[in-house]
C-alpha cells in the first residue's frame, strides 16, 4: 500500500484518488528528491490539520521518511519519567518506530550518555555516523547488524527539544550508496525534529489544561451539589446547621433577633438570611453599622431630620428606620449605641413610631429589627453601659453564630468558594492543591471567615502560579506568634495569680481619664491611638472622643 493510502486508512478516510500521493510519486523520477520532500511535508501537515494526536502523526511521519526519502527504521526515543530514587540515572526508550519489530522496540532503551543515542540526549548535539561498523560507540542494540543491509549503513540522530532542552531523539538508518546528498537528509530531519518537539509540547500543554479544567469542574460540581449553601451561607458543619435551624424557625415571626458571636463570623449574612426567609423578603433590607456613626449623628441617621433642624439641613431626610419601612433593619455592633439613643430606639421598637430630629409629628414604621454584637450585653448592663429594658427587648431570639474554629468541616468549602469568587472578580485562574486545603484546615483563624476570605483574595492576586501548594500557602499565612494574645505588662508577670483581664471593657464616664493620662498613653505608644486606647481599657471611639474634649491634637 502506498503512503497516501496508509495515511487515509489511519485517518478512517477512503483512499486518495489517483491525482493524490500515488500519482504524484509516479510522476517524478526516483531522483526528484525535492518533490519527494514537498510531498512528505504536505502529507504530515495535512495529518496534523486533521488530528493533533502525536502518536498517529509521528508513526505516519516515520513511515513517509522511509517510503519517500529512504531514511529507514526511523525511531523516536523519548526520555522516561524522572527516576523514583534520588541519584538514579535517567534513561530513554523508543516510543514510536517504523520498520522495527516489537522485540526490537523493546530493546531500544538507553541510559543518559550511553551510545550514540544517549550522547545526543546528554549533549543536545546531533550525531552522524558515516559507517556503523567503524564506530565503536554504536551499540546496534535495537537492530542487530545481521538484520541490516550488507552494504555500508549510516546512522543519523538529532535531538528533539522543548524549551531548548533535549527531551528525545529522532534517529534513522541511511544507505550511503544512495544518490542523495547527506546535507539534504539532515535539513529535512532538522525540520521534522523541530515539528516533533512542538507536537509533544502542545500535547503536554493540552494535558495540563485538561487536568486543571477537570479539577475546576469537580469543584464547581461539588458546589452545585451541596445542599448547605442556603442564603449564601456555605457549609454543613453541625454548629452552622444548628444556627440555620434556629434562624429558619423564627424567620416567619416578627420577633427581634439578636445575633451573638465573634467578629468576622458572618453576622451580616445571617441577618440577610433572616430577611430572605421571612415574608418581608421583597421589601427593603437596610444595614447600619453603629460603630461607624459619630455620637452626634446617631439620631439624624437612624430617625431622620426635618428641614432647618440644624445648620446645613436644607431639606428633610428620612432616616434608616423610615427607609426600612415594611422591611428589615440590621443594626450591627449595637453595643456601641450611646445611652441617650438607646431609650429612643426602645420607644421606636415598642410603639412602632419615631419622631424626626427637629420634627413635631410621629411617623409610624413597620420594621423587623435584627441586631448583632460581639459584646457580652448582659455584662454591659451590669456595669451600666447598656439599658436593661432595651437588652430584654433585643434578647427575645438570641442566636449564637459559631466561630470558624468550631466549624472546621466548612473551611474547605469556604476556601473554594472564596477562590472562585476572587478568580471571577480579578480575572484569574488560581486553584488550591489538596495539601494547601489541608493546611487551611489546620490554621487557627482567629479572624474567622473574614480573615479566611481576605487571605484567599490576597493569595489569588499574588500567587506565582495557577496551582497553590502547601509550601506557597505558608508564605501568605501569618506567623503563629501573630495570633497569640499580647504579652502582659511587667506587673502582671510579677503576679501570676492575678485574675485575667475581662473579655468586655468596663464602662467609663467621659471624665474618667485626665489629660495627663491620655497624653502619657499616647507618648508610650508613639502616637498610636488604637494601642493607647487599649492600654486604658477604652475603645478607639471613646479614646478619640476624650482627646477632642481635652483639646489634644
Image (tube, rainbow, N blue to C red):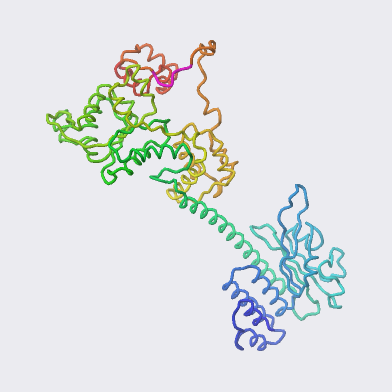
Instruction: Tell me where residue 462 appears, x and y as whole percent.
Output: 51, 43
Q: Is residue 210 above or below residue 538?
A: below
The residue stretch that appears in magenta:
500-505
Which quadrant would the N terminus be assigned to in this image? Answer: bottom right
Which quadrant would the C terminus be assigned to in this image? Answer: top left
Rendered residue at 30%/17% (across/down) = 551
Q: Is residue 549 above or below residue 37?
A: above
In the rendered structure, the answer to whether residue 188 lies left or right of residue 347 reads right
In the rendered structure, the answer to whether residue 543 lies left or right of residue 418 reads left
In the rendered structure, the answer to whether residue 512 lies left or right of residue 321 reads right
Residue ranking furthest to the front: 249
Instruction: Tell me where residue 2 appears, x and y as whole percent.
Output: 68, 83
Rendered residue at 46%/44% (across/down) = 418
| Magenta stretch contains residue 352 | no
| Residue sitting nearer the eye, 184 or 346 | 346
| Residue sitting nearer the eye, 339 or 235 | 235
Q: In this view, does 276 lie above or below 183?
A: above
Instruction: Tell me where residue 19 appears, x and y as whole percent.
Output: 60, 88
Rendered image quadrant of residue 44? bottom right
Rendered residue at 36%/24% (across/down) = 377
| Magenta stretch contains residue 501 | yes
In the rendered structure, the answer to whether residue 199 lies left or right of residue 458 reads right
Amino acid at each position: 500500500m502506498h503512503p497516501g493510502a496508509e495515511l487515509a486508512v489511519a485517518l478512517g478516510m477512503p483512499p486518495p484518488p489517483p491525482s493524490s500521493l500515488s500519482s504524484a510519486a509516479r510522476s517524478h523520477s526516483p531522483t526528484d528528491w525535492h518533490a519527494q520532500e514537498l510531498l512528505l511535508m504536505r502529507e504530515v501537515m495535512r495529518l496534523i490539520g486533521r488530528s493533533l494526536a502525536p502518536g498517529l502523526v509521528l508513526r505516519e511521519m516515520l513511515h513517509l521518511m522511509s517510503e519517500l526519502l529512504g531514511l529507514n527504521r526511523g525511531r523516536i526515543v523519548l526520555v522516561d519519567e524522572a527516576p523514583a530514587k534520588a541519584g538514579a540515572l535517567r534513561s530513554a526508550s523508543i516510543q514510536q518506530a517504523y520498520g522495527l519489530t516489537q522485540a526490537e522496540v523493546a530493546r531500544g532503551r538507553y541510559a543518559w550518555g550511553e551510545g550514540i543515542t544517549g550522547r545526543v540526549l546528554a549533549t543536545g548535539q546531533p550525531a552522524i555516523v558515516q559507517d556503523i561498523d567503524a564506530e565503536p560507540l554504536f551499540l546496534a542494540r535495537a537492530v542487530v547488524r545481521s538484520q541490516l543491509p550488507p552494504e555500508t549503513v549510516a546512522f543519523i540522530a538529532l535531538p528533539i527539544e522543548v524549551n531548548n532542552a533535549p527531551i528525545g531523539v529522532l534517529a534513522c538508518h541511511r544507505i550511503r550508496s544512495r544518490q542523495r546528498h547527506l546535507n539534504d537528509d539532515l535539513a529535512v530531519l532538522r525540520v521534522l525534529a523541530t515539528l516533533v518537539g512542538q507536537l509533544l509540547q502542545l500535547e503536554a500543554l493540552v494535558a495540563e489544561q485538561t487536568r486543571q479544567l477537570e479539577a475546576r469542574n469537580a469543584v464547581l460540581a461539588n458546589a452545585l451539589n451541596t445542599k448547605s449553601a442556603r442564603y449564601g451561607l456555605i457549609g454543613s458543619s453541625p454548629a452552622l446547621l444548628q444556627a440555620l435551624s434556629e434562624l429558619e424557625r423564627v424567620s416567619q415571626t416578627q420577633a427581634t433577633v439578636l445575633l451573638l458571636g465573634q467578629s468576622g463570623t458572618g453576622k451580616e449574612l445571617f441577618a440577610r438570611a433572616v430577611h430572605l426567609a421571612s415574608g418581608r423578603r421583597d421589601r427593603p433590607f437596610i444595614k447600619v453599622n453603629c460603630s461607624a456613626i459619630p455620637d452626634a449623628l446617631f439620631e439624624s441617621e437612624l430617625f431622620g431630620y426635618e428641614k432647618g433642624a440644624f445648620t446645613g439641613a436644607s431639606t428633610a431626610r428620612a432616616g434608616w428606620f423610615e427607609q426600612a419601612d415594611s422591611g428589615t433593619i440590621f443594626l450591627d455592633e449595637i453595643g456601641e449605641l450611646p445611652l441617650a439613643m438607646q431609650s429612643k430606639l426602645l420607644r421606636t421598637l415598642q410603639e412602632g413610631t419615631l419622631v424626626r430630629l427637629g420634627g413635631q409629628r410621629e411617623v409610624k414604621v413597620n420594621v423587623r429589627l435584627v441586631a448583632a454584637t460581639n459584646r457580652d450585653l448582659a455584662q454591659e448592663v451590669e456595669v451600666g453601659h447598656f439599658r436593661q429594658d432595651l437588652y430584654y427587648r433585643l434578647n427575645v431570639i438570641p442566636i449564637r453564630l459559631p466561630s470558624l474554629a468550631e466549624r472546621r468541616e466548612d473551611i474547605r468549602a469556604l476556601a473554594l468558594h472564596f477562590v472562585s469568587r476572587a478568580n471571577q472578580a480579578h480575572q484569574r485562574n488560581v486553584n488550591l492543591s489538596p495539601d494547601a486545603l489541608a493546611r487551611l484546615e489546620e490554621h487557627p483563624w482567629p479572624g474567622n471567615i473574614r480573615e479566611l476570605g481576605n487571605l484567599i483574595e490576597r493569595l489569588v492576586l499574588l500567587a506565582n502560579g495557577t496551582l497553590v501548594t502547601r509550601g506557597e500557602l505558608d508564605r501568605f499565612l501569618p506567623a503563629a506568634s501573630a495570633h497569640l494574645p499580647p504579652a502582659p505588662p511587667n506587673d502582671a508577670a510579677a503576679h501570676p495569680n492575678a485574675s485575667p483581664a475581662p473579655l468586655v471593657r468596663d464602662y467609663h464616664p467621659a471624665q474618667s481619664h485626665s489629660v495627663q493620662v491620655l497624653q502619657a498613653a499616647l507618648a508610650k505608644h508613639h502616637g498610636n491611638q488604637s494601642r493607647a486606647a487599649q492600654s486604658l481599657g477604652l475603645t478607639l471611639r471613646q479614646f478619640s472622643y476624650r482627646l477632642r474634649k481635652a483639646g489634644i491634637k
